[in-house]
Each structure stands twice: as structure tokens, then as C-alpha cells.
Image (cartoon, coloured by chain):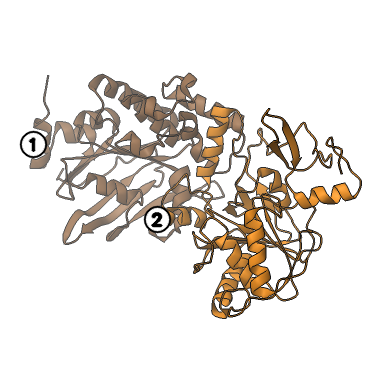
Amino acid sequence: MSAAPTAEGYTFAFLDEQTKRHVRRAILKAVAIPGHQVPFGSREMPLPYGWGTGGIQVTAAIIGREDVLKVIDQGSDDTVNAVNIRRFFARTTGVATTTRTADATLIQTRHRIPERPLRDGQIMVFQVPQPEPLFRLEPRRAETARLHALADYGLMSVRLYEDIAHLGAIAATYDYPVRVDGRYLMSPSPIPKFDNPKLHRSPALQLFGAGREKRIHAIPPYTTVESLAFEDHPFEVQRWPQACALCAATDSFLDELIVDDAGTRRHVCSDSDHCRERREAGHVGSDGSA
Amino acid sequence: MSAGTHSPPSLPPSPPPLLSARGLGKRYGARWACRDVGFDLWPGEVLAVVGESGSGKTTLLNLLAQRVPPDAGTVRYALRDDAGGTAAVDLATLSEQRRRTLARTDWGFVEQHARDGLRMTVSAGANVAERLMALGASHYGRLRATACDWMSRVELDPGRVDDTPERFSGGMQQRLQIARNLVTGPRLVFMDEPTSGLDVSVQARLLDLLRSLVDDLGLSCVIVTHDLAVARLLAQRMLVMKDGAVVEQGLTDRVLDDPQHPYTQLLVTSVLQP
């Protein structure tokens, strides 16, 4: 995909150089302390909070002219959020963009990690609405900071205990809490718990930006990331009895779509690039039209 | 015997004190809420702190439990070391992390209002198991079994392990709070008026329960109370406080039967007899 001509009157990647340097310093600190939330001076961006202002600032701070950018939203490259952010960076930097996970060097994402395993040198940027995993359990910021400092995470265990006591299983299906490098409790942003295992010892650098909450956290490559669970209620990812209707994949994260007024349901891969790759490799789902 | 002094009976092999306070004081502005308090608490001993409202009892308890920093004096505690022995350390020199660990493993703190010491929105089981989970226990079945066991030990129906404390009566909440504190097998428990706010029959049952738990587990306790009957029933020794200072201390029976200080005499004679 060729880049649009760069918009005039803007610095490379929109943010001014001082701001980018400031964000990079926060990123370096975050990488040095895996899972720790580093405060940073989040800027106003030309999109509303909740649309990825944190992710976009992280991307703007680290993108280089040689980078190939991919932006996904709920696994798909062609949803509104993804299309707009991709076009934003194409216009303000002129870097090449792609929808192919294999070709990208920098992937900004909302809600998913690509199905295709990441490789050395790739960087994932996550858009994070709420970086504080203890947010719903302890409303005071000063107190959560102290709990993190003392690695006092009994509160989160209480929440998981309650889920099992009342529902028979841990109910969190997205934003499932993880322990990074055996130390910090971290919220992995609203990715489905299906993607949690992909965080563990990933060869890619993973950066998390929360614009409204003004926090950056990170998982350096090859870092241990453990999803919390009980010994007798181990962590499990979602599974579907169906296969993808387009590419027949049985091991990917599936979206359930209602396709007509009669309530006909169809399951398709949430990761559109992964689905395309499989169809190009000759896999055909129940829909038949590859 | 003069007021304010007390020498423990000279038993042959005396263990070192568990907790000792020296010259302990806390000031709010120019006013000393608690001043120059010194005593030793021995393993297995129950010490009652009595006095009227505003006499500094709760401030003293908070100072001892390291919940507020003292303005004067020290508190030394016989910390368990790795070798299985104990070593007395000045609590002020411990890091916040060590103090927190100490407070949730080797100590308990029973609040006056059970609501302050419990998580009202999570189940009784989670309340009891919380300390264990904070220490890293991660087997749900065993945590739940421990919670049920402790609930029955404090005379709560284990069948209500999944109910929230909101749905318990005041006395039940207080017993749940006690279970939550004792689950890690602490050696020292601080109690701030544990029986006030409960009606008399519930008080009696709770006192009975406390007495048997203290005996069975060999707990040391510091109990703040304004109720001399509670002191008489539970404590071997008591401190009488007035205006932030200890005016008299000694064996409970001695202080109550033969009060020396005029204030203690007043306190003892003010008790209503039905």
C-alpha cells in the first residue's frame, strides 16, 4: 500500500520533537521496569479520548522513516479506528503502511494481538483505556501505587476468589490480569484472555499507552508474563466449537456475526489478515467462496 | 505498692517480652493525645487498656500497631527470625514492607466497627482467605476449606461462606472479623473495643469465644475497652489511662479490687450494678 503525500505544516508524526523525546523517556523507563506504570505528560491529540490517544502518542514517539505500520482494531485492518489512525500516520509521516502482520515493523492495536506469531524486531503498541489493574477494587490512586510498590496483590486474588465462589469460574474474559516478570500486576488492555499467552515471552517489544490516564507501561521482549489463576482453577483460553466460515481455522479467535434478519449466525476470524493468509494458502471454510 | 508501678512475679525462666513500649507519645498540635507510656507485654498475656472516652486509648493502640508514627518513644517487638528464635527490634527501623508483612501475618487488628475491618462487598470466605492469598496461597479448594474451618471455629455457619458480611448481624460480623485476623496464626492481636456496640447477650458470647481462642492459641492481646467487665474477664493485666497518661497499671484483679489512683477508684465505683 503506498503512502499518501505528507501533510504540510506538521512535524514528522504530528508531535513536536520535545514531546516525542519526553514520551520516549517514559517508554525507556517503562521498558526498564516491566509492567510498571510510568506517568507521562499526555498531549491533546486530534482524536477523542477512548479512541487510542495513548497508543497514537507512543507510536508517534517511536515511528521512524523506515518503519512499516499496521493498525488493527478488534483484529481487523478496515474498521473506522484502524483506518483513521493508519491514514493519520501515512499523512503525517509518509511511512509505508500495510495490513500484513508479516511485513509490519510497528503494529498499533486495539483489542487484539495478531494470530501470526510476532518476530524479533517488531513492536506492538496497545491502546489502553485503564492501565490500573486494581482500578475497580481500590479507588485511591495513592493506595494502588503503594500496593504496587509493596507487591501487595491480595485484592486481585480476592476478586478472582469471588468469581469462582459465585460463578464457578474466573469470569474475566478480557483485560485479564497478568503478573509481569514475577513482579508487577499489569492490565494487558482489553485484549481477550485468548491473547494472554501471546504476551508471554514474546519476541516483540510490547508498549502500552493510556492517553487519558497518562500512563505508559511495557513488556520487553522475552519477558515472563503469567496470567493469574488458582492452582485448582487454572487459566484457560476461550475455545469455539465452530470453525471460521471463511478459512476453516479452528485455533483462532472467532467473531460471531448475525448475518440476516432470521438470526443466522456465522463465525469468522477476528484477525482479518490471518484469515486472508489462510484463504490464500487454500483453506476454504463452510461459506465455500475463498 | 505505689501507683503506676508493677513488677512481674519472679518466675524462674522468664521469656523475653513480646512487645515493649518505652516513653511512647503522640502529639496532635500542642496537645499530647498519649504521653510517656511504657509497659512490657509477655507472650500469651492479655493486657487491657481502660479509661474514659478521649483518654488516648485508641491512639495508644494505633501507636503500638504502627498505624501512626510516634512523636516520642519506641516500640520493640520480638520478631521471629529464620532460626526459629526471636529477636527484639525497634519497629520504627523496619521498612514499610516489613511492617506490612508483620501486620498481616504475625499480628491481627480487630476494629471497633466490624465494617472497618471487613470487606463488606465480598463474601465471608474471601474475607477470611484474603490474608492467605496476599501471602501467595493459590489453591481455591484449600482456601475455601480454611475459610469454612475458621468460620466454624468462631461459631459461624460455614454454609454461609458465600454470603457477604452485609447480610450478617453485628455480632456475626465481629466474629468474622476475628476469624479474618486469626487465619494466619498471629502471635499478637490488637483489639479496639471489640464488644462495644453489641447487645449484652451477644457480648457475652463473643467474650466467651475470645477467651477460649486466646487460651487455645496462646495469643497475646492488647484490648482497648471502656468496659471493666471485659477487662476482668479477659485480661491478666491492665493499664488505666487518663488524659493521655497511664495513671495506674497492674494485675487486673489487684487494680479492680484495690484501686490506688483516685481516677481508678472513681472508674471502679462508677460501674452500674443491675
Q: Residue at x 64, y 73 (%)?
A: A92
Q: Is residue B169 visible?
A: yes
> The disc numbered 1 marks a residue on which chain?
B
> Which residue does the numbered mark 2 point to in the structure image?
B91
At label 1, which amino acid type do we have?
A: Leu
Does residue B88 show up? no
Chain letter of the residue carrying label 2? B
Q: Is residue A270 above or below residue A266?
A: below
Q: Residue at x 64, y 50 (%)?
A: A111
SS label for mark 2: helix
Shown colour of chain B: brown
Along the line of sight, the residue nearer the viewer: A286 or B150: A286
Q: List the residue tagged with mark 1.
A: B266
Looking at the rendering, in which quadrant would you find the C terminus of chain A?
Answer: top right
Tell me the amino acid under the disc marked 2. Leu
Residue A12 position, x and y percent, is: 63, 77
User: Relative to residue A157, is residue A122 depicted above or below?
Assistant: below
Badge 2: few (under 14), some or many (20 or more) residues near its Cα, within 10 Å?
Answer: many
